[in-house]
Amino acid sequence: MVQTVRIEAVSRERAGKGAARATRRQGRVPAVIYGAKQEATLISLDPRDVMKELAKGGWQSHLYAVAVDGGEPVRALMRDVQFHPVTDRPLHVDFQRLAPGQKIRVKVPVHFLNEATCPGLKEGGTLNVVRRELEVWSDPDEVPEFFEIDVGAAKIGDNLRWSNVKDTKGTKPVIADRDFMVATIAPPKVEEVVAAPAAEAAPAKGKAPAKGKAAAAPAKAAAAPAAPAKAAAPAKKK
């Protein structure tokens, strides 16, 4: 059954940005309750109450009983929260009033059972969760806390869909045109092994590697100096 939370509120008369800023200066969070074909009700909240609900998680699936000025609580869902862009403080809260017999659209978390005995996971596969929450239409008083899917017999490559939910608990999926995917058992990732480059061939044994350019051949020996010319013979006397 859905969790019902009582939250105290104080009515406020004026709408608009100026009135909202004035409410914040008083240390409160402006809010509104709308829907069910009724006039919107302007209220303000204690910021500590808002932060407490936001810290719980899953606040969009909780049913709230908003008591305005201590009067009869109004059944509503917290539909939207606006935050300050720097401080993350809540600036405004929207509640949707519920009409009698009205179905509500909520997100319900999904839990996976028997992961320890799943054949696909034992073989190295991975549980790839596509949707951690399933959006459904539900009676306000019968919203499940969670759905369950048993993966105890799932193998690598198996798909787990809406039809694998053990008990839908009277809800109807928002996605109604197909048996949509919730999770898969993905195969193990194979890492590509890159071969190391082959080592450079070692130089032949006994042969020293060439270092730079070969030394120039020694210059030819200089030619021997020419023999001195013979002295001219003396001229004969007449």
Image: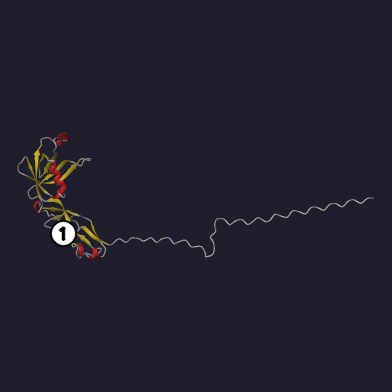
Q: Circle 1 is placed at which residue position?
A: 148
Q: Position of residue 93 (x, y in %)?
A: 15, 42
Taking the image as shown, residue 133 lies to the left or right of residue 213, namely: left
Answer left or right for 228 relative to 25.
right
**In the rendered image, the vertical position of residue 197 relative to residue 86, given as above or below:** below
Furthest-right residue in this view: 238
The amino acid beneath tag 1 is Glu
> In the structure shown, which secondary structural element does the residue marked by tag 1 occupy?
strand
Q: Nearer the viewer, residue 94 or 180?
A: 94
Instruction: Report how many numbered discs are placed on residues in the image.
Output: 1
Q: Position of residue 187 (x, y in %)?
A: 27, 62
Q: Position of residue 179 (x, y in %)?
A: 19, 59
Instruction: Name above or below for residue 68 compared with residue 144.
Output: above
**Camera-side residue: 203 or 150?**
203
Identify the residue shown where x is 14% and y is 46%: 53
Residue 83, picture quadrant? top left
Q: Is residue 216 left or right of residue 139?
A: right
Color style of the picture:
secondary structure
Picture quarter with the N terminus? bottom left
Measuring from the top left, give residue 114's x and y in whole percent. 18, 63
Q: Residue, x 14% and y 45% (percent of image)?
A: 52
Q: Residues within 10 Å of mark 1 (few under 14, many from 20)?
A: some
